[in-house]
Image: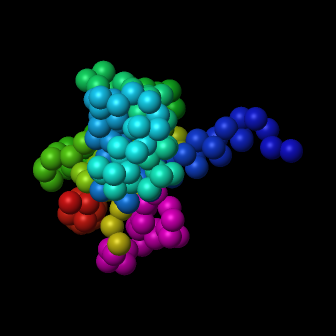
Amino acid sequence: MMQLGAMMATMDKALETQLNNIEQRSGQTLQALSHIVLSSEAQKHGELVKMLKSDHGLGHGDANVVVHYAKKSGAFATDDAESESQAFQRIYVDKKQHLLPIHQQISKALANLGEFETAPKKANISYRRRKQFCLVGPATNTQVELGLNVKQLPDSPRLKALAAGQMCNYKVRIADVSEVDSELITWLQAAYDAAK
């Protein structure tokens, strides 16, 4: 029988996947969709679902999930949302603290690409334009994992292609700041460009 903690982790993962799929289908971030829900004059759940379906083209299931999500995590659409630097302090603690410079170097590279949003998660940070283009966080106590959402990248022994249906198409493990090099930045650029 599945332990309660394992069941909750599986449910959290399923919800995260569903929310990412909603962003991809709708072409809007959860922050934007949450803002629409929270700033709407409609108050009843059914009215909000109907509004998302008619005005924003969401399917019934997606609209229902977005309304629940927005009402449950209303702070997501406010100025109180966690900043990237706050997420760094929360994620990179104890044995993972020495990995922070790697993520900061990736963040510096991302800043040169153009405008995007950061969306801190429990164990990593999602970077988004119209949709998520990369996901960065500690994979182990010795490596940071960079997930990339881009359909095709040149073959490289550093890149691992992921099966369809994953949150990212590729991932790469990074153990040292020096690995945030021109090749990796080229991959970031490709993922960033694909998310416009």
Task: Report whether 118 appears left or right of 124.
Answer: left
Q: Residue 154, located in which quarter of the rendered image?
A: bottom left
> Does residue 152 show up?
yes
Closer-to-camera residue (5/159) = 5
Q: Residue at x 30, y 56 (%)?
A: 27
Q: Give the quarter of the figure containing the C terminus.
A: bottom left
Between 169 and 131, which is closer to the camera in this rendering?
131
- Seen from the viewer's position, the closer of residues 154 and 157 is 154
Provide residue 66's location: percent of width, then percent of height. Answer: 43, 42
* Residue 194 placement (x, y as % from top left): 25, 65
Report the side of 188 relative to 69 (left or right): left
Q: In the image, residue 179 lies at what x, y percent?
A: 32, 56
When the figure is inspected, residue 112 is found, relative to residue 83, above or below; the finding is below
Which stretch is magenta? 152-178
Q: Main secondary structure of the magenta part?
A: loop
Q: Residue at 34% across / 35% down in the picture?
A: 37
